[in-house]
Amino acid sequence: MLSTYAFIGIFTVAAITFPLLPLIISAIIRPNRPSEVKLSTYECGLEAIGEIWVQFKVQYYLYALAFVIFDIETVFLYPWAVAYGQLGLFALIEMGIFLMILTVGLVYAWKKGALEWI
């Protein structure tokens, strides 16, 4: 019984060693010559002027969140569409409820003005 867990231990050690070993070797052999130019802030090839930390509008994050939600919806819809012939009416009703929940969320966000680009 212990031999079955030995494979898990070997794979765990390998999964930890293979990513860490190149990082450790590169940290040891790389040249380390910091200078003022290398440590300065780089912004599109221009010298940074003024405050470097910029606050972004929350709308950017809301659009990204909406994209992720509908991207995940596509991930759920694709296998369902492939296997639709074998699933039957129950799966059709479930997918209809799933799409209705997402549509209600989209309409709610639209009515609250969360998708306005101002």
Image: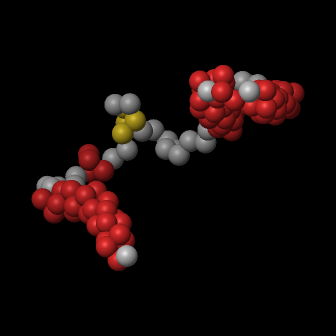
38 displayed left or right of 44: left
Tell me if residue 55 can be seen: yes
Identify the image quadrant of the C terminus.
top right
On the image, the x and y values in percent for residue 67 come to 63, 30
Q: Residue at x 49, y 44 (%)?
A: 52
Q: Residue at x 35, y 66 (%)?
A: 8
11 displayed left or right of 95: left
Residue lying at the far bottom in this picture: please name it. 2
Q: What is the count of numbered marks?
A: 0
Identify the image quadrant of the N terminus.
bottom left
Q: Residue at x 62, y 27 (%)?
A: 83
Give the colouring mode of the picture. secondary structure
30 displayed left or right of 23: left
On the image, the x and y values in percent for residue 9 come to 33, 70
Q: Residue at x 69, y 29 (%)?
A: 87
On the image, the x and y values in percent for residue 113 come to 82, 29
Tell me if residue 9 can be seen: no
Viewer-nearest residue: 102 or 108: 102
Viewer-nearest residue: 37 or 107: 107
Viewer-nearest residue: 110 or 1: 1
In the image, residue 15 sits, relative to residue 52, either above or below, namely: below
25 displayed left or right of 104: left
Which of the 4 image quarters holds residue 107? top right
On the image, the x and y values in percent for residue 31 come to 14, 55
Viewer-nearest residue: 6 or 18: 6
